[in-house]
Amino acid sequence: MRDASSKRPATLKDVALAAGVSTATVSMILNRRYQFKPELEARVREAIVALNYRQNPVARSMATGLFGSIGLVVLDIRNPHFTNIVHGASIKAQEHGYNLIVVDLKEDVSHARQTLDDLARRVDGLILSLRLPQEARDLPLQLGKPAVLFGQTLHEPAPAPLSPSIQIRGWEAAMLLGRHIFEAGRKRLTYVGYSRSIWNADRINALRTLAEGAGAEVREVSVAAQTMEAGEAVAASLIYDAWRTDAIVCYNDMVAIGLLHGLCALGVRVPDDIMIAGFDNIPVSRYVTPSLTTVDMRSEDLGGGSLERLHRAIQSGDHSPGVELLEPRLVVRASTLAQRGGEAGAPR
């Protein structure tokens, strides 16, 4: 029997002989085609390690029609929200033996269709953002590739995605933040939004809906990018005007952190003068001063859940559409914990 010291590379037949099973059984275990008893799979994998067996990816693809790779397309990998989505997907990809190929569009969707067309030829399935144009989201179906979409629900009725999706309740996320701020007695809220996002309208509309019942007012200000720099750049314009805002909700945590930095540099006391909050619950939001109130948009769960659903589609051939919903979670921190009572608002 061949052992690991042999100069000849181990073959599938060598592994089968060492494990006492057929070559077909070894192939099905390697290619995740069938689930065997744990002790049998363990015996095969022990033989693989002992013989230092390396599967030929070209031969594997020819035999199974699969590449062993998943494509994940994100809008901007610099945004920790998408980084966490990648992290969640990566964990599940490793569990199921996939290579994860990540493509960063850098917030430019103009070439998304061509990018997906190229990527689809090298992977077994695709994970895509619901923020991509419709023609890009539908492309995998045209190419016969399974796909799973991730993103936020839209409050207004919209056509259901043609592919399965993992979504988080976006309207409810804004309602959680707005209710927290208005219950603290704040009456003049500024929403710092990002108009290029399809989620933007839901957030401002949810805040305005709550404001009507709370006797409060909401205005919207837009930034050109979802970055800390963009948030810092609008800080002065938000306090040196006649609005006298006493609370600010930002499109995401990065904008909120940049704005927080800018306001503190201008002598604004957060949260006593102005409360600040964001969305996503990125890791750094806990460590800024004051720590940032935010809504956890379940980034890792979106990534991990999407890959898990795609794995099932690849294994079963079931590409039927369907929506799995995640619930947002309010995370209250120091940036909105001012004492009740007294006149709030930026110093003039």
Image (spheres, helix red, strand yellow):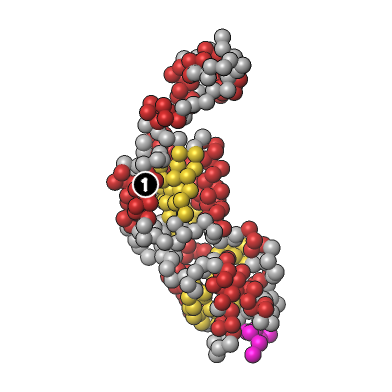
Locate residue 224, reporting x and y percent. 47, 72
| Depth order, front residue of 293/119 | 119
Determine the residue positioned at 36% across, 46% down.
118
The reply, left or right, for residue 271 in relation to residue 307 is: right
The amino acid beneath tag 1 is Asp
The reply, left or right, for residue 152 in relation to residue 244 is: left
Would you place residue 292 above or below residue 149 in this image?
below
Looking at this view, name the residue that lies furthest to the left: 142
Query: Could one spot residue 180 in this view of the protein?
Result: no
Determine the residue positioned at 39% across, 46% down.
119
Locate residue 60, reporting x and y percent. 42, 28
Would you place residue 223 above or below residue 10 in this image?
below
Locate residue 267, reporting x and y percent. 69, 82
Task: Decide whether residue 347 is among the magenta residues.
Answer: yes
Local secondary structure at mark 1? helix
Quarter residue 126 falls in: top left
Task: Decide whether residue 226 is among the magenta residues.
Answer: no
Looking at this view, name the residue that lies furthest to the top: 1
What is the chief secondary structure element of the magenta stretch?
loop
Q: Which residue is mark 1?
A: 118
Locate residue 125, reporting x and y percent. 40, 42
| Depth order, front residue of 121/322 | 121
Q: Quadrant of the C terminus?
A: bottom right
Give the residues in magenta. 342-348
Determine the residue positioned at 68% across, 66% down.
288
Density class for disc 1 (Cα within 10 Å; few <14, some 14-19, many ≥20) is few
Determine the residue positioned at 42% across, 30% down.
58
